[in-house]
Image (tube, rainbow, N blue to C red):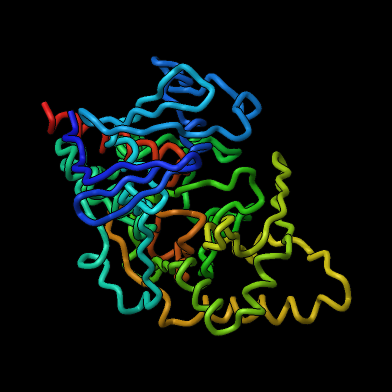
Amino acid sequence: MSKPPSVQNVSATPAALRVDWTNGAVSEFAGLWLRDNRPDDRDPHSGQRLIDVTDLPEDPRIRSAVARDGVVVIEWEGESQRTSFDLVWLLEHAADRARQRPELATRLWLEGAAVDAPRDLAWTTLAEAQSDAAARLAWLTRLLQDGIAFVSSVPCNEAAILEAMALIGRIAETNYGLVFDVRSVPQPENLAYSDFGLGLHTDNPYREPVPGFQALHVLVASPAGGESLFADGFAIAERLRAIEPDAFSRLTQTPVPFLYRSKDAELYAERPLIQLSARGDVTAVHYNSRSIAPLRLSASDTRPYYAAYRRFGALLRDARFQLQLKLDGGSVVVFDNQRILHGRKGYSSARYPRHLRGCYLTRDSVYGETALLRRRLAREAQQ
């Protein structure tokens, strides 16, 4: 059981509850919010709500509030039933409380060229991830904070990526299958399957939903060429917001058509190059020059949009913002496909073969695996 937080004083007006904690912090909870979150209105097994907002009184009034034995007991005007709130629960859900999930604390890295991947980013071995839950949680947390992380010592066979990804999240099957092979083939339907270098991009912006995470397992590394490139799209988008706010705004408000067409697939979606949350935070970057379809812009909007588009593209091409590294055979890189842009240097498959096996992971499963693992370890620590 969690130790109840220490309370100095509890007071209430008809409209709100105030809790003064002994550390000097003060939390206020609106009566309407408290009434909406009564424990009695949730199913005791699933925790799901049993009521709808229309079932609430429009103006619930607090008659009294008393703290005792780790709970706050509230009496309501015009209602006979009391409500008890656990103080730990109130503290966790206070509006002024910092986010409780460490993985939500995004860490930006703009200067990619200055990043030393072995030093600055998270690495684990497959054996460690399999045997040490705490190490796996630390690695997952860094993956979600930094947007990218690495696994080494993964066997160089075609099934190993499935074994490794079972520790991270759920694989999303696409028209490419559960997994796909990145190697040069004659007359490729996708330029990823060629010798060409690839500029920084995110994968599959034409898909709904866009793949959340991508994993690439190096089965055969080319000794000449084929270096991997990565950049933090969130950091570069924030850079654009800082230096050219009008361009940033235009890229967040203009829907862009993306299209993929092959003999057995026709995929189309529209989304802005930079996507924002309701708070105005950057939540996704969708940038893929190979699959962008003709833009639907008025003549008057075309020039300013292309100016913003070009400015963003120039930032992505700036070598200062690119992490370049050569991954050895047996290495797996996992990255947030809606944040981290990736690319590669060109190579000659006729001289040196290069073979990566990849897959996509659903976004919710990676966050869910992290949260479940943290909950499990916290529970074990209390036993």
In this view of the protein, which residue sits in the foreground, 335 or 45?
45
Quadrant (top left/top right/bottom left/bottom right) for the C terminus: top left
Residue 220, x across and y down, in percent: 34, 54
Task: Name the residue at the bottom extreme.
Answer: 243
Looking at the rendered image, the quarter that the N terminus falls into is top left
User: Residue at position x 47%, y 31% from top?
Assistant: 37
Would you place residue 148 above or below residue 17 in this image? below
Depth check: give the residue in front, 259 or 257: 257
Residue 153 point in image, percent of width and height: 21, 48
**Residue at x 34%, y 28% (from the top left corner):** 73
Image check: 131 left or right of 294?
Answer: left
The one nearer the camera, 281 or 308, is: 281
| Residue 356 seen | no
Q: Does any portion of residue 299 appear in the rendered image?
A: yes
Across and down, in percent, residue 188 comes to 61, 54
Measured as percent of width and height from the top left, residue 147 is found at: 39, 57
When asked about the image quadrant of residue 111, the answer is bottom left
- The total number of labels drawn is 0
Q: Residue at x 60, y 28 (%)?
A: 57
Residue at the location (66% across, 27% down)? 54
Q: Relative to the observer, which residue lies in front, 87 or 203?
A: 87
> Can you say whether 371 is above or below 102 in the image?
above
The quadrant holding residue 298 is bottom right
Give above or below for 320 relative to 279: below
